Image: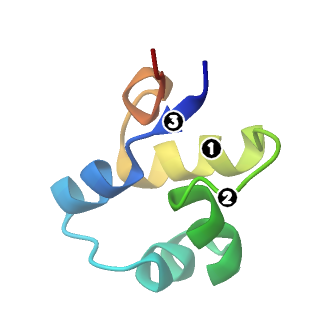
Amino acid sequence: MPIRNNLHVLMAKKGIRSYSELARRTGYHYSRVRHFGNEVHQRIDTELISDLCKELDCELSEMLYIER
């Protein structure tokens, strides 16, 4: 069962229109945010997820879910 994310939904709720805007706001490189958003990752980066949750003012359970 793959782990998926709701990054697009959470960004839209905060009015963040692009990965580059989110990258600027969090201090991460654009490609790192884009890869996470497009679910092109082999491992879960807890630091990145924590910082994204802080910026988007959401809980971990709102960010990640298990696809069944």
Between residue 42 and residue 52, name the one nearer to us: 42
Q: Secondary structure at mark 3?
A: strand
Q: Which residue is mark 1?
A: 49
Res. 4 mark: 3
Identity of the amino acid at label 2?
A: Val
Location of the N terminus by quadrant is: top right
Q: Is residue 66 above or below residue 40?
A: above
Residue at left 27%, top 78%?
Answer: 17
Q: Are marks 3 and 2 in contact (CB under 8 Å)?
A: no
Q: Is residue 55 above or below residue 53?
A: below
Residue 68 image-quadrant placement: top left
Pointer 2 local density, CA inside 10 Å: few below 14, some 14–19, many at least 20: few
Residue at left 33%, top 57%?
Answer: 8
Gap in angstroms between the C-alphas marked 1 and 3: 12 Å
Residue at left 53%, top 82%?
Answer: 24
Which of marks 3 and 1 precedes in the sequence? 3
Residue at left 51%, top 59%?
Answer: 37
